[in-house]
Amino acid sequence: MTDQNQWQNQAWGTGQPQGAPAVPGASPAASPLQGQQAQPQPQAQPTYAAPQPAYVAPVAPAPAPKRRGWIVGLAAVLAFFILGAASIASCTAVMTSSMGAFSYESPSWADTVTGDTVGIINIDGTIQYDGTTSSPEGLKAQLDAAEQNPHIKAVVLRVNSGGGVATAGEEMSRYVRDFSKPVVVSCASLDASAAYMISSQADYIYTAETSAVGSIGVIMSVTDLSGLYEKLGISVDNITSADAKDAGGGNRPLTEEERAWYQAQVDQINDVFIKTVADGRAMTEDAVRALANGLTYTGIDAVGNGLADEIGTLEQAVAKACELAGIPDADTVYLQSSTSDLSRLLDIMGEQNEDTTTRALKELEDRVGLE
């Protein structure tokens, strides 16, 4: 509600001239014509008292009693906004992937490579389906092009990612495993979870001493907003074909049976993760399971426990790739698809929607006093 700081029905006064009262006992002035018939004398002009204010100062209205009915309306608008932001973000991912399909079919670097070359592929940010080299479709496009290009002798994956979608990580790890030319990983600051699942399939892994490596494990987040809805006076009726169809929808807590169901899925996916790492790193599954505590290790510890091979830089990773390819040295080229302007715009829109939603939720929390 906007503040209403305007006075309505203001009373405006008008200054009225007021004549001076007669002074008791005052005699009229003597006439200079003595003995003549007295002539009427003009009365003195009236004097005015100090003028009155031209208006009466309005009295501020009493503050209206606070009402909390706006909370329900705000919550409804906020819920609509969140759903809209989620829809836009979803459309962003789909459209970005679609637009990317037109660009990574013909890599921009293919016509510039001559002589022995090591291709460098950046895997940066969230592992997901967005058409970039941090996605299955984007990585596969670059690996396929490198496979077919006779000048590309090996590939270095420059990884700086904390993970992402488990299925995307699984697909990407298969593409790396099936690539016929040498693959060397250079860990940047972070190589964790699904990103490490991909890295584990390389022929050699370099890491910095301070890199965070590992985080072998699976997480599934289920949000329960029923307490918030109750506080805001919002009710949700789900019409479902089965009792568990709305499980994880956020409108109610999970039942014990549903929680056990999801836990079994998490455990199964974790087994796939452990087996993939064990195969890629030539370790036993028991050895990997002992390290699969969900936490990251420093680069120093990762080399010590077998999750990485050596402390080194990107340049050392390129030199190792040349060694594995059997060439003395090589040029380097970054293998990446060109991103359309529309794709970049959609990414920016998605980020802005997320930021706006976060601010709106924070404001709602401050106003309502959520605990």
Image (spheres, rainbow, N blue to C red):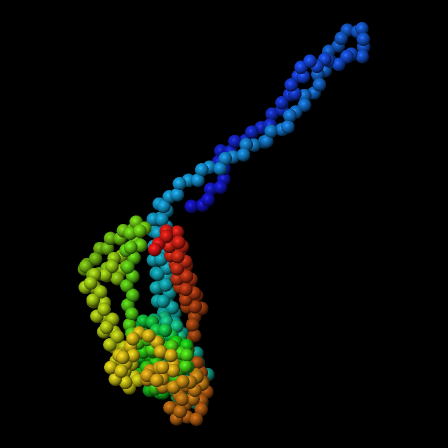
Identify which residue is drawn at 54% across, 32% down.
56
Asked if 29 appears above or below 63 in the picture, the reply is: above
242 on left or right of 62 = left
- The picture quadrant where one finds residue 21 is top right
Pick the residue in front: 371 or 234.
371
Asked if 48 appears above or below 340 in the picture, the reply is: above
- The picture quadrant where one finds residue 164 is bottom left
User: Residue 142, percent across and down?
Assistant: 38, 80
Identify which residue is drawn at 41% across, 64% down.
351
User: Residue 229, percent across and down?
Assistant: 30, 53
Identify which residue is drawn at 29% across, 79% down.
291
User: Residue 242, percent across and down?
Assistant: 18, 60
Does residue 290 appear in this view? yes
- The picture quadrant where one finds residue 100 is bottom left
* Total count of labels: 0
Asked if 209 appears above or below 243 in the picture, the reply is: below
Does residue 106 appear in this view? no
Asked if 162 appears above or below 84 in the picture, the reply is: below
Pick the residue in front: 157 or 100.
157
The C terminus appears in which quarter of the rendering?
bottom left
Pick the residue in front: 299 or 16.
299
User: Residue 283, percent across and down?
Assistant: 28, 85
